[in-house]
């Protein structure tokens, strides 16, 4: 095992535009192999350790299945059954886990936790969702857009709903890939000015906020949303249901978007809340491809973080 400083994926911009483009090319290659059952085991004898402090279906499944398909093994730890839930310092856990595993994926609360872990890790650390960011999701989303519509550069993404971890990552991606994000949230849930600075948005070219969700959706190439209440904020659920009632992506909103607009949702979805059933189950929805692409893009990510740029 190398003791050189590892590369991490804690935020989307931890990889350069060139490296992210490489990941998309590799995702396509790895996906094609998967579809024809071609054995591809570049990570044979490598172990992924997955730490979950919040629930998951897609992230766990895609990382665990993905590592298995690349020839390696995956170990699942959660807060309840490990010493992490009994107050072992993150720094100590990182020291130990990164001496036994070759790569680590963490889903947790504050971004600061994953940063502390990474500082003390000998091996690459991947953000599997924090309160602030969800970079693996946006890898899959942009790859899905490219598959369906080609380059995302110069396009407009409408984000309708909560200015949460997924929204923050779309904003970061807009800067890296040069597209626009039009955000509409209820009053009081806007993207915080401080977050705009942290994300690294250089100016108004890539981001605009709209009071009316229809204005955000007008002419958009991609319309997307997420749950009104993210994990960790459950105490606000009833209040949020009232506050977000007018921020549902429905058929009328899709009609005002570009004629060939696609609809995305990171899932899990709540039909009748943030999205109408006729939209998520309708012809413009690409949500199942989007979910499947978590598998292919994360396999490309693990390959890159462990082996660097390879092209076979
Ligand atoms: N989209 C996503 O991260 O799904 P899970 O919460 O099921 O992992
Ligand atoms: N914003 C949601 C995403 C779930 C995949 C959450 O953090 O719960």
Image (tube, rainbow, N blue to C red):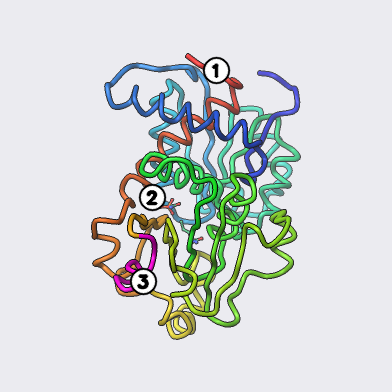
Q: Which mark is residue 133?
A: none
Task: Tell me the magenta residue range.
Answer: 250-258
- Pointer 3: residues within 10 angstroms few (<14), some, or many (20+)? some
**Whether the residue under disc 2 has CB within 8 Å of ligand 1:** yes
Q: Which mark is residue 57?
A: 2
- Alpha carbons under labels 2 and 3: distance apart: 29 Å
Report the magenta stretch's main SS: helix
Of the image marks 2 and 1, the number of the one nearer the N terminus: 2
Local secondary structure at mark 1: loop
The reply, left or right, for residue 7 in relation to residue 209 is right
Above/below status of 177 relative to 42: below
**Residue 147 rendering spot, x and y as whole percentages:** 38, 39
Label 3 belongs to which residue? 253
Of the image marks 2 and 3, the number of the one nearer the N terminus: 2
Query: Residue reaching furthest top?
Result: 312
Local secondary structure at mark 2: loop
Q: Give me the residue at 32% from left, 51% from top.
A: 286
Mark 2 or 3, which is nearer the eye?
A: 3
Label 1 belongs to which residue? 310
């Amino acid at each position: 095992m190398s003791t050189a400083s590892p590369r991490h994926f804690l935020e989307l911009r931890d990889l350069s535009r060139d490296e992210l483009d490489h990941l998309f090319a590799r995702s396509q290659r790895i996906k094609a192999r998967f579809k024809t059952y071609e054995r591809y085991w570049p990570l044979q004898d490598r172990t992924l350790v997955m730490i979950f402090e919040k629930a998951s279906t897609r992230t766990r499944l895609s990382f665990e299945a993905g590592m298995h398909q690349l020839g390696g093994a995956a170990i699942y730890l959660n807060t309840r059954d490990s010493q992490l839930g009994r107050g072992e310092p993150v720094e100590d856990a990182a020291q130990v886990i990164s001496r036994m595993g070759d790569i680590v994926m963490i889903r947790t609360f504050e971004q600061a936790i994953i940063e502390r872990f990474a500082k003390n890790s000998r091996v690459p650390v991947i953000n599997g969702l924090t309160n602030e960011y969800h970079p693996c999701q946006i890898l899959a989303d942009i790859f899905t857009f490219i598959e369906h519509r080609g380059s995302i550069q110069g396009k407009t993404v409408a984000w309708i709903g909560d200015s949460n971890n997924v929204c923050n990552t779309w904003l970061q991606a807009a800067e890296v890939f040069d597209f626009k994000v039009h955000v509409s949230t209820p009053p009081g849930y806007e993207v915080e000015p401080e977050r705009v600075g942290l994300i690294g948005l250089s100016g108004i070219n890539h981001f605009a906020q709209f009071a009316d969700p229809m204005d955000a959706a007008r002419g958009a190439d991609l319309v997307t949303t997420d749950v009104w209440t993210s994990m960790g904020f459950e105490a606000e659920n009833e209040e949020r249901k009232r506050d977000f009632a007018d921020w549902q992506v429905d058929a009328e909103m899709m009609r005002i978007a570009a004629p060939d607009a696609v609809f995305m949702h990171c899932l899990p979805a709540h039909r009748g809340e943030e999205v109408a059933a006729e939209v998520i189950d309708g012809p413009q929805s690409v949500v199942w491809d989007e979910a499947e692409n978590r598998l292919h893009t994360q396999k490309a990510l693990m390959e890159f973080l462990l082996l660097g740029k390879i092209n076979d």
